[in-house]
Amino acid sequence: MADISIITEAADILGEAPQWNGSEGLLYRVDAFAPAIRRMRPDGSEAESFAMPCDIGSFVFANPGHLVGGMRTGFNHIDLETGSVTPIVNPLGTDPRLLLNDGKCDRRGRYWCGSVHSDFVGRQAALFRLDPDLSVRQMDDGFIIGNGIAFSPDDDRMYFADSRDETVWVYDFDLETGMIANRRAFFSTADIEGRVDGATCDVDGNYWCALVHGGAVGCISPDGKLVERIELPVRHPTMVTFGGDDLASLFVTSASNMLEESERPNWPHAGKVFRIDGLGAKGLPEPHFNHDFSQTGGRN
């Protein structure tokens, strides 16, 4: 039976991108619109926050003390020791309302990141891949908002959700070349409450996702069936990740900015971070970006 606990008291504006750093024993996340990167112990203690110069949608770990952030200004190298944020490359168009959103590394250390238009104008979102040599490539386009990136444990599949299109797509994935093909529908949220936001896979290949606007976390089997739905005391969960020493705890971020003022009394825990234990599932370590920034300082 799922055991749900709240591990933060302070509320994020738009909590996103939780990731467990196993070598540090710390949980990281972003508050996209604060904007900031935050980290803490898995019980919520020893919390720290690092201010960012602009909106940040996601990040990945690189070598110790170094991150790569997907931001409103494109991909940036983040040095937590010095607090510096250095541009790497910006694949976005000239419209300042475009920004990088959900992102994950594959197991060859490439950073995949979807984008979004702040006003959801048209299908301007795309899927990008930042390679370890710091070059960037657009891999697909025509989306409203890029979310839900995850890789199957056998590395044969890559998942990518368009929340506003009510669809999770799946691609055939070639780990060695980093290429994707044969995009097809994997799961639709058209007939359920909530839309797929951030996601991850467990060791059995199940796709765990935050059901934003639906107040729940969902587990979707590899054949595209919703096999579990866990209700949360928050209306807008945003992303999930497995963490803890055994990768058996599911951490969930949430948003406070999506609530109307009249709704706030009904959802006092909006923007907080949740921990779910007792799921009987175990996650996979999230790969790190395969570039040594201590040698290059983030320059290509």
Image (cartoon, grey):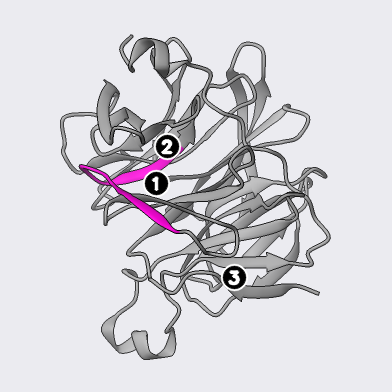
Number of other residues with Cα within 10 Å of mark 3, as a class: few under 14, some 14 to 19, many 20 or more: many
| Above or below, comparing residue 65 to residue 22 in the picture | above
In the rendered image, the quadrant that contains the C terminus is top left
User: Is residue 189 visible to us here?
Assistant: no
The amino acid type, in three-letter code, at marker 3 is Ala
Number of other residues with Cα within 10 Å of mark 2, as a class: few under 14, some 14 to 19, many 20 or more: many
Q: Which residue is mark 2?
A: 114
Q: Which residues are magenta?
A: 47-59
Question: In the image, residue 74 lies at what x, y percent?
Answer: 29, 30
Q: Which residue is mark 3?
A: 216
Give the Cα distance between marks 3 and 1: 20 Å
In the rendered structure, are the residues bearing label 1 and label 2 in contact, judged by CB atoms less than 8 Å apart? yes
Residue drawn at the location 59% of the way across and 22% of the way down:
180
Circle nearer the N terminus (2, 3): 2
Circle nearer the N terminus (3, 1): 1
The amino acid type, in three-letter code, at marker 2 is Gly
Q: Is residue 1 left or right of residue 109?
A: right
Residue drawn at the location 44% of the way across and 9% of the way down:
133
Residue drawn at the location 30% of the way across and 89% of the way down:
262
Provide the secondary structure element on which disc 2 rests: strand
Give the Cα distance between marks 1 and 2: 7 Å
User: Is residue 228 visible to us here?
Assistant: yes
Q: Which residue is mark 1?
A: 145
In the rendered image, the quadrant that contains the N terminus is bottom right
The reply to whether the magenta stretch includes residue 56 is: yes
